[in-house]
Amino acid sequence: MFAVIHPSHLNGTIQAPASKSSMQRACAAALLAKGRSVIHHPGRSNDDKAALDIIKRLGADIISNHEDVIVESSGVNPIASDVNCGESGLSIRMFTPIIALAEKQITINGEGSLLNRPMDFFDEVLPRLGVDVQSNNGRLPIKIKGPLDPKNIEIDGSLSSQFLTGLLMAYSAKTSPQTSPQSRGPLEESAESRISIVVRNLTSKPYIDLTLDVMKKFGLNVPENRNYEEFVFKSEIRSRSLGTKSEVEYTVEGDWSGGAFLLVAGAIAGPITIRGLDMMSTQADKAIIEALSRANASFALEPKGIKIRTAQMNAFEFDATNCPDLFPPLVALASYCHGETKIKGVNRLTHKESNRAVSLQEELEKMGVHVETNDDLMIVHGGHDVTGARVHSHHDHRIAMACAVAALSAKGETVIEEADAVEKSYPDFFDHLTKIGANVSLSSKIKFHE
């Protein structure tokens, strides 16, 4: 799909999309929580659909309507011999340890760039927990056969916090009484135990805060967090599953990752108001507010949402090590900031849907924005004319959105190839831009004039 973006003046109010970070974690927690879970404001992205399909294959019954997703679960009881994570890095990293709870061998696969992402973590860690792992030289597909046996373990958290999220969920399932937060029942045939996961060099700590928050809201056993260096489960090993049922209601948060693109769009071509972004959220990408402040963007936190408008913006410095998904909207923002913006955390960009450091350099350079990298630092030379160009998404949803946002005040039209990459996380992105005044047209084919 091609998206053609013309210079636009935005005005209006838009609701932020549902957070796929929140939605996917809710799917995993609903599977493990046993009983009935009602998920309000569910996400509809491709990643969200992949998570729902995974828990269905792992035994959950799902009823979905426009406003809610209802999950009935008795735990991990696979009804299929394989699962497909689509292109979701979170799903493969979070669900693999959960799948390992089952005694049945299950093949885990994926699509697109996920096939090339390293999964050596599972080869190294899961066998230490009694799990048989067969991978394709550290790549997909992976064959997993449990059951996982929680043990004291030390892991490296430098590549992604998502691996830890999966282990925390799986450990919780083996130590949780599996009752609702309001009604803790007695355990059968249990023994006191203290199990810990020690983590070195943990990145993206706010995402672990989100994981622990979701676990708590679904009544799972939440470990003690000792400064993100050790997570201690003080409970009891469950020797056999219980028949206790519970009901949980959970509302998926508005997505700060998708919302960041809307906020930057407002700073470049507003004024607009974005609703549904919780300032108390534990999502890492809420840090976009700090970046906007440093850029001297004009915004206000109002009861109806965040109102943001155009203003003279200056270059800024920002550490995105713990929120690497902010790099694309930050580069789009920096393109309109006078001076050299310096963003730290480039080393976190290699194993995404694309190598985002390279993708951002290549595509923004086409639009007249000079972007360079120096070790872990990205430098954006902003404040000069941004020009429309023919760019490519690299099949990466965030690159497509960054180019679209940067195009809103560019000189001339911008054509984005493979723009349907946005379906992965924000399928309504172009529709939402149009609703607030962006001049956007979508087509399956387009004629280019040389």
Image (cartoon, rainbow, N blue to C red):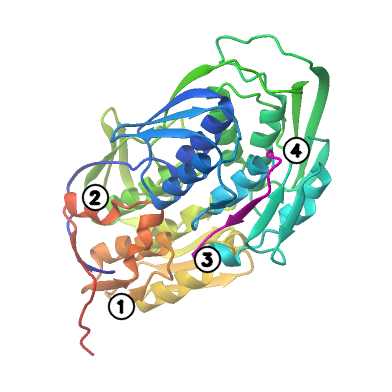
**Closer mark to the observer between disc 3 and disc 4:** 3
The residue pinned by badge 2 equals 432
* Residue 413, x across and y down, in percent: 21, 73
Count of numbered marks:
4
Is residue 285 in view from this perspective? no
Q: Earlier in the sequence, mark 4 or mark 1?
A: 4
Q: Name the residue under label 3.
A: 113
Q: Which of marks 4 and 2 is nearer the N terminus?
A: 4
- Magenta stretch encompasses residue 373: no
Residue 211's place in the image compared with 128, above or below, is above
Element at label 2: helix
Q: Name the N-terminal-most of marks 3 and 2.
A: 3
Amino acid marked by disc 3? Ser
Q: Position of residue 230 (x, y in %)?
A: 76, 35
Mark 3 or mark 1, earlier in chain: 3
* SS state under label 3: helix
Specify the quadrant that holds the N terminus.
Answer: bottom left
